[in-house]
Image (tube, rainbow, N blue to C red):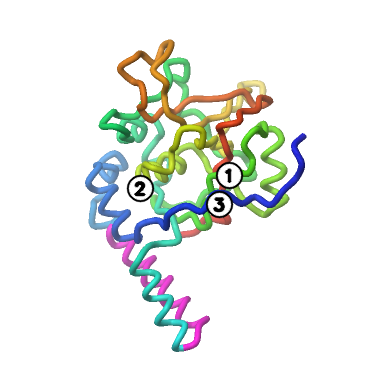
Amino acid sequence: MPETMPITSTVLPALPTLSVQAERLIELGVHEIAGLPAAELRTFAETATAAEAAAAGESATAGEAVGAGEAAAAGGSALLAVHPSHAPASALAPLLRRDDKPGFVVTDMPDVDLFAPLEKVALPDAPFYLLTGIDRGDQMANWSPAEALPALTEQARTPLVLTEGIHWVLQQPDILERNHCFMTIGSRLRKANGALDARTPALWISNGTGRDGRERRNAPKVGWCWAGNRHTWLGFASATGRRI
């Protein structure tokens, strides 16, 4: 097993504000996929933003509060996600874009929407929720999913589920880079006998080879890797928590 290290990654750009994220999802039609009105998504973003501002004001001095407000205006610290029961991976993947090419799910993953959160990964019981402290997990490149999960747990981090990873790339397409892509091991498929399927979901950039087809070269790709295998170009996306 690789040497244990702090689960930190490359410094990445700040997320857009929650209101900007909500508008991005509405522009893509995610609210329609979820069967929910755009106004409900906007209201969630506005309410969450107000709650964050109030919390910052309570915990900061007057001078610090101004700085916090300026930071909030420049960017956000949380990722807005739609619960996978409302917006499954198969519906979200085609909304991804890179070089004007749409995202896709690999052909040998027709059961992509059956991958569900692990028992230890609790999603909020709400159509919309937030993820805090998201990280691509570059420091864990060349670890296997089987090695990474207990290490993330030890660091008090929670692995992203597949739809959360897709939401991240929808908001920040450049997060997906060649040689710096990521797995979403919070999602696994459980077999009828109760055992876990050996596949673990991941997002990366297609090389346009094999069944992907040359026309999909450089397109965002939802695929899978074996739980016991290591990949030098895949980290493990995680967060510090989830909340409404």
**What residue does disc 3 label?**
239
Residue at 44% x, 58% y is 78
Q: Nearer the viewer, residue 146 or 83?
A: 146
The x and y percentages for residue 1 are 77, 34
The x and y percentages for residue 83 are 42, 45
Amino acid type at image mark 1: Gly
Q: Alpha-carbon neighbours of circle 1 within 10 Å: few (<14), some, or many (≥20)?
A: many
Using the rendered view, name the quadrant where residue 104 is placed: top left
Q: Look at the image and say whether residue 221 sits in the magenta stretch.
A: no
Above or below — where is 197 with respect to 181?
above
Which is closer to the viewer, label 1 or label 3? 1
User: Going from the N terminus, do you reach mark 1 or mark 3 first?
Assistant: 1
The magenta segment: 42-61
**What residue does disc 2 label?**
171
The x and y percentages for residue 109 are 47, 20
Amino acid type at image mark 2: Gln
